[in-house]
Image: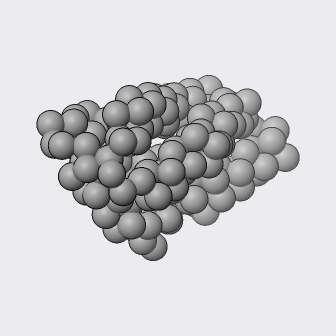
Amino acid sequence: MKKMIVLLLLYLLTVALSAGIYFVFSNTIIKSLSDFPSELATKTMQKINQVIQNPFFLTIFFGPLLLGSTLSWHYLTVKARGRLWILLSFLTYFLGVFLITIIFNVPMNNKLDNNTDGSYWPYYMIHWTRFNTLRFLCCLLTIIFLFLGLIA
């Protein structure tokens, strides 16, 4: 039981850190870059996209997948109260954060990396931010569902 508490806390922590990262990008970083000329904003975001791919960020991004799936499996197999909320928490992260990242944000980052004149920036800034904000909101839902599972 103590192992599950540790896993739940780690799950909560990694999702909360993910939410914070997505919030800061939508609320601050992209808005700040929107004041720059497109070419400079493009180069800056290209650099940010390179720097963010580090072990700490990757642990925060992939951690909820491993932790959420492990917890979902455990709670479903022991038929614990709140198990469906825990599963819904994991599915929200998987569908609303992981898949959106893979299907939308990463391809837009790749296209931005191949853009040298800044012409893609206006499109990127609007659409990437929309998907990023959705990732933030899905992190919040993930946390809410986790709490509902714990208090059920």
Q: Residue at x 64, y 43 (%)?
A: 103
Does residue 152 appear left or right of residue 78 in this picture?
left
Q: Which residue is drawn at 58% across and 40% down?
A: 104
The image shows residue 133, relative to residue 94, as above or below, that is above
The image shows residue 30, relative to residue 17, as above or below, that is above
Which residue is farthest right? Answer: 77
From the top left corner, tell me how far across and down residue 28 is, in percent: 21, 39
Q: Is 50 or 70 nearer to us in this picture? A: 50
Q: Which residue is drawn at 47% across and 58% down?
A: 114
> Where is residue 51, by image quadrant?
bottom left
From the top left corner, tell me how far across and down residue 64 is, in percent: 57, 52
> Where is residue 87, by image quadrant?
top right
Does residue 80 appear left or right of residue 18 in this picture?
right
Q: Report the label total.
A: 0
Q: Can residue 149 be seen in this view?
A: yes
The image shows residue 12, relative to residue 27, as above or below, that is below
From the top left corner, tell me how far across and down residue 3 is, in percent: 61, 62
From the top left corner, tell me how far across and down residue 36 is, in percent: 16, 42
> Where is residue 49, by image quadrant?
bottom left
Does residue 72 appear left or right of residue 149 in this picture?
right
